[in-house]
Each structure stands twice: as C-alpha cells, then as structure tokens.
Image (cartoon, coloured by chain):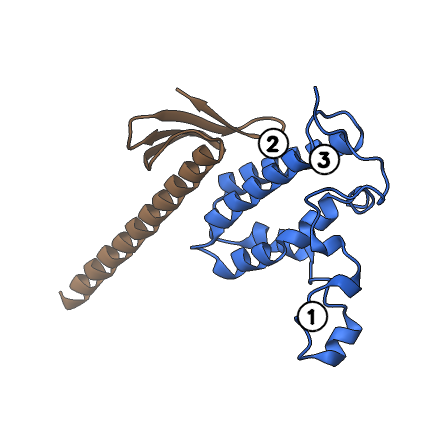
Amino acid sequence: MPKQKPPAASKSEPPKSATPSGAPPSQAAPAASAAPAAAKANPPSAPSLDLAALEERLKDTKAIGLFTKLSLKNQVDDLLKQFRAFYDRKSSASLDELRQRYDLLLLKVLSLLQDGDPPLASAISGSREAIWGILSDPQKFAKL
Amino acid sequence: MVRRKHTLALAAVAALGHLTIVAAADASLGKDLGATIALQGMPCDKVVDAKRNSDSDYTATCKDGNRYHVFVDSSGRVVVQKI
C-alpha cells in the first residue's frame, strides 16, 4: 500500500491540496479593500462560515426530499468517518483522495440544490474552501 | 337549484385541488426517490411509479424499466436495492 500516510496530528504538515482558508490572514486576497473598517474587524481571509446555519438550511430546504436529505446525511457521515480514520492512521486513503471524495459529495449537493434553492447552493459553494479548511486540519477537525 | 350547483362546483374544485396536491406529492416523491437512487450511483432516468410498502419503504419503477427497493434501515441509512 504505497499510499500517502496520514499526517501527524499537527499543523506542521499541511495537505498538498490545503486551501487558502488555512493560510494566515496576511496572505489572503485583498478583496475586501473597499470596506476597510469591516476588513479590520473581520480579516478577509476568514470567509463567513456558519456550519450550523448551513446544516439548518439544508434540513429546511424544500428543494430536496426527505430520502435525498437522509442519503446526503449518510454520505456526509461516511466522509467524516473516513477523515477520522485518516487522522487516526487507520485508513489507506490519502488526503488527496479525501479531497476528491469531498469535492464529489459537494458536487452532488450543489447539483441537487442549484435549481430548487439557488441561494443555498450558492452559500454552500461559497463555503467550499472554508469547510475543506476545517476538514483538512486535524486540530480543527477534532473540534467538529 | 342554484345553491346545489354551487355546492357541486365547490366539491369539484375541492376534488380537483386535492388531486393536484396528490399529483404534486407524487411528483415530488418520484423526484426524491429518483435523486436518492442516483445518489447511490444506480441508473434511473425518471421514476414513473412509486409504490409505498410501509413507512419510509418504497418500490420505485424507473422509466428505463429498472426497479428499486428504497427504504431506511434500522440504523437510519437509506438503502437502495435493485429488484
């Protein structure tokens, strides 16, 4: 099994595909230059991410039915288990593979929502990297 | 006589409304089952019939002829089995 080993539980080994969300605030794109006051209060590198709110909106949306929601929840739980196994060094999957699975799952969610609930699809799409930033960071993931 | 006609008309409208709601629910269920089947990676272009077996337990027939047993197992997982 010559696959990539799970990283040690520290930030010293960032994943190859880690996203800018894990980067320090100073490296963020200066997109918020038009609102300096707000930018000072909230660093631009920290995209607004409210996982609980997104979860609630997913539960409440009428764009997808109950079976679909439950199937998605099953798949999200499965992916979280895979991340847990990865960080516990009990998985042969690499972080790159987990990223692919994460991307695929997000694509499924977006394709299901894009017609029936475009605002939610947009919110999830906009949180894509921030969520990955949590998943790919062992310490942040442990706090989930 | 006029009152009777009105009553009949109202009953007809109510029945039609009910049918519309039932049809919408069926369409919604078909869409839900179709998306669920697709999420499990199984082929189904469109669900044309859904038979309820019990709570959270359906037999779905797809336009392409594929039939699936879709249900929620005791651990809360959605299971899709090809029939």
Label 3 sits on residue: A83
State whether discs 3 and 2 lie on one chain: no
Q: Check contact, mark 3 vs mark 2: CB within 8 A.
A: no
In-image side of A74 versus A25 (left or right): left
Q: Colour of chain B?
A: brown
Residue A52 picture location, percent across and down: 69, 54
Of helix, strand and loop, which one carries label 2? loop
Say which amino acid is labelled 1. Answer: Pro
Of helix, strand and loop, which one carries label 1? loop
Q: As rendered, which of A106 and A136 lies closer to the eye? A: A136
Tag on residue A30? 1
In 3D space, how far apart are the residues under numbered discs 3 and 2 (Cα atoms)? Answer: 21 Å
Residue A58 picture location, percent across and down: 57, 51
Residue B55 picture location, percent across and down: 49, 32
Say which amino acid is labelled 2. Answer: Gly
The vertical placement of A124 against B60, above or below, is below
Label 2 sits on residue: B76
Q: Estimate how packed mark 2 is, as few (under 14), some (14 to 19) or many (20 or more) residues with alpha carbons within 10 Å.
A: few
State whether discs 2 and 1 lie on one chain: no
Q: Chain of mark 3?
A: A
For the point 46% across and 31% down, the residue is: B41
Q: Chain of mark 1?
A: A
